[in-house]
Amino acid sequence: MDQGRIEETVVEMARAARTASRQLAALPGSVKDRVLLRTAERLQEERDYIGRKNELDLAAGREKGLSAAMLDRLALTDKVIDSMVQGLREVAALPDPVGEVDDMKRRPSGIVVGRMRVPLGVVGMIYESRPNVTIDAAALCLKSGNAILLRGGSEALHSNLALASIVQDVLREEGVDPAVIQVIPTTDRQAVNVMLAQEEYLDVIIPRGGEGLIRFVAETSRIPVLKHYKGVCHVYMDADADIDMGVRIVMNGKTQRPGVCNALEGLLVHRDIAETFLPVVAAELRKAGVELRGCKRSCIIVPDMVPASESDWGTEFLDLIMVVRVVDDMDEAMAYIQQYGSQHTETIVTRSYFNGQRFLREVDASAVMINASTRFNDGGQFGLGAEIGISTTKLHAYGPMGLKELTTRKFIVYGEGEVRS
């Protein structure tokens, strides 16, 4: 597809999404739920078709030399399809936020003022690998009344187009414009540039992928971007922390899935428990193949720990590597988090109610936790259903973005002929 044709195609798709979004915004919740449930059924029925299209991507990936981890992210196994089906059903079961009215108040002038929840309009999403994101994003946008224009990674094009075609078939059968969910059908990167210039038709851009992709989108887009650059998450072990609890939380955060954004990257330990806690947790982490890179005090306590370099602090390793620092108190821990964290997820392990509450109030992150694994920062775990991403910006969402984060609120006014004096 030549450059002129790419621009023409993307602009036309964006325009069609804008038109379709108006119908979707007014669609009854019962119809949206029916589309979601029928799509879940259709995914079950079309496993062979999905598998054939996915194999085209996997074969191309193997030929290009993609790593085993990347191929695993790309594969639409029966387990992944089951997860997509479950996600669709869970989103269908959630309350429809569109049209919710609250904060109704009568003003001295006589008018009654309130707020109504409405869709954002048209979402543009740019993401890498993981074709199941196509279904997650489509489900959340459909339920929240938003059209969505999707540009997936080049390595997953056949899979993404196949999944979108299944949703579009169901939309047509339900009398809904299929342009509410579209996948840009080219791997040319020029399509991203064109997409990011469509401020007339798109209301928000949501990038999901590596830090390089997200920074490119944020720097290039003419459209507001909801994003997080990276997930540098920490656990702080307070002076009176439960040792066994801390080991469980650290092991889960670091070793369950080290390549995801809510995985643990840094461990901060109060000096009063460092000599007790560090040898125990280091032994468990070593069994799981984790390389620890520590400060001078940490390396004295655990002699086989690798001395950390300055560049290690604040790094998102996305691997079985973690930094360790012994701190004098909670103030030093929070100062470290402020300097090296990414406003994603921070956890304190403590028996102190006062310290826990202070940590919740003073630490700036999209999720701040007491005595729980950083791995819980996830839309499904928080009861949002599927999530479209995690935002570490504060306008207009902070944390996992579910249905309500894909809407905004407009003011509504009831009057009986009042005029302003």
Image (cartoon, grey):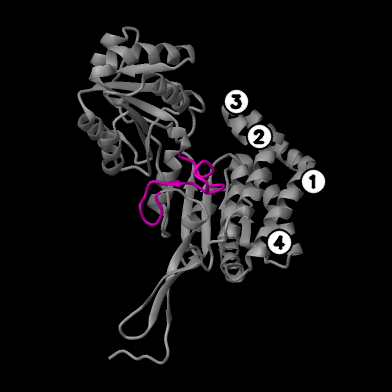
Residue at the image position 62 percent from the left and 35 percent from the top: 74
Spatial CA span between label 2 and label 4: 26 Å
Q: Is residue 190 visible?
A: no
Mark 2 or 4, closer to the camera? 4
Spatial CA span between label 2 and label 3: 10 Å
Question: Mark 3 = which residue?
Answer: 68
The x, y position of residue 303, in whole percent, is 31, 7
Question: Mark 4 = which residue?
Answer: 171
Q: Do the CB atoms of the residues marked 2 and 1 lie less than 8 Å apart?
A: no
Seen in the image, is 133 located left or right of residue 178? left
Labelled disc at residue 75: 2
Task: Establish if 27 lies above or below 300.
Answer: below
Query: Mark 2 or mark 1, which has the lower sequence index?
Result: 1
Mark 3 or 1, closer to the camera? 1
Amino acid at the residue labelled 3: Ala
**Image: magenta residue range:** 377-398
Quadrant for the C terminus, please: bottom left
Spatial CA span between label 3 and label 1: 28 Å
Spatial CA span between label 2 and label 1: 18 Å
